[in-house]
Amino acid sequence: MTGTTDAKAGLATLEGYSRAELLRTLEKSPRSQRVQLISEALARLVGRSGHPWMTELAVIADNQHLATRDIRSLTSDLGWASRDAGDPLPTEDLTPDGPVDVDLFRLILVYTRGQRLRFDFRFRQLHECAHTWLMEYDDALIRAFAAYAALGLRHPDALNLYRQSIDASDADQVSRHVCLDGLWMGDHITDQAQLLLDLSGYMIGRGEGGGNLYFRRARAFSRLGDTERARFDVYRAIDMLPPGNNAIHQDYVREMQIISTRADLEEAGRRLLDQVRQEVRETAQQEVADATKVMGERIKSAERLVGDGLLKVVEILGLFVTLAAFVVGGGFAMLKAESWEQITGSAALIGVGSLAFFALLRLIMRWRRD
């Protein structure tokens, strides 16, 4: 780190906080506990004007040679506490209130501003800031901020930024959590649920599990229709939540209610769909039966009409044949007649037969019509 001073020189002592006491405690504590101890100590400075905790964090981080992942974790926790205390968003031109490594302080400021903008869902401002910061730093967390903002804004480069952050050599638990949070809100992504499951499963496998992780994964299971596993993850997130986090607890409970409501709506939708299908099936069957009945009646009627027509033709042809035979026979009889009386009788017989034929023909036509 450049431009640093001895952290023990001019030790700050504020009400409820002593840098000297913190440094002595850290020297006696295992490295695995140092981040938690620093977070608890600096939390006493949260809420004070000018964000003095950021200056103290820069001094302590330099003195303890904290890794980047530790600084990310501390700025996330303390940034959330600062927001909860009502602190204003630290400005881009904020300067430390003491001699510190200016480069380290700048990184802490960038991380803190990114987390605060994320916590407040200020996607557009975070998107602009993150792209500016990326010209200054090649950093997985800043890429995660850019991906988070792009997912919230539904920008087309969102998934590309997400993969850049996930695949970065300096990716860690904090940057992955920011990416997971962004995916959780990216409900416009077609494979959102699978991406959430993949990342959360990877993080759990690395031992990075926490309440928020299971809370986010519950959304994936819910979208995939696995309500039981979604509820289990929410219950697990609630069990992992320490006391005093009432706002987060409400978020978890609200998600559980959303999952239950979604499951109820999906079940009601399935029942309604089954009911509609059954009604459509029954209606179609009845319509087919009615149509078949009507068609059968029409076919029978047509058959009767055709049969009656053929019968009429046969009967009429029979009458015509009979008439022809009668006329021919009568005419032959007239030709053979030898007296006037026989001729007159034959003619009268032909006339009577013709009249009888027309009378029978009219009787048949009227009977068929009735």
Image (spheres, rainbow, N blue to C red):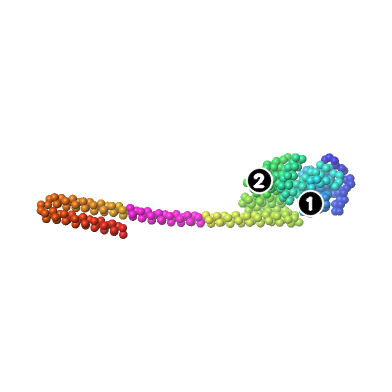
- Left or right: 340 as drawn, with respect to 183: left
Looking at the image, is 279 positioned above or below residue 60?
Answer: below
Q: Is residue 286 magenta?
A: yes
Q: Is residue 241 magenta?
A: no
Q: Give the image location of residue 91, x and y in percent.
A: 79, 47
Looking at the image, is 339 positioned above or below residue 137?
Answer: below
Q: Name the residue tied to disc 2.
A: 195
Q: Residue at x 86, y 44 (%)?
A: 99
Looking at the image, is 205 positioned above or below residue 291?
Answer: above
Q: Alpha-carbon neighbours of circle 2 within 10 Å: few (<14), some, or many (≥20)?
A: some
Q: Alpha-carbon neighbours of circle 1 within 10 Å: few (<14), some, or many (≥20)?
A: few
In terms of sequence position, does the residue under pointer 2 or pointer 1 come before the other? 1
Part of the protein shown in magenta: 278-306
Q: Give the image location of residue 264, x and y in percent.
A: 61, 56
Q: Give the image location of residue 141, x and y in percent.
A: 74, 44
Q: Name the residue tied to disc 1.
A: 88
- Residue type, numbered disc 2: Leu
Asked whether the viewer can see residue 252, the reply is: yes
Front residue of 311/327: it is: 327
Quadrant (top left/top right/bottom left/bottom right) for the N terminus: top right
User: Which element type, helix, strand or loop, lies under badge 2?
Assistant: helix
Query: Which label sits in the foreground, 2 or 1?
Result: 1
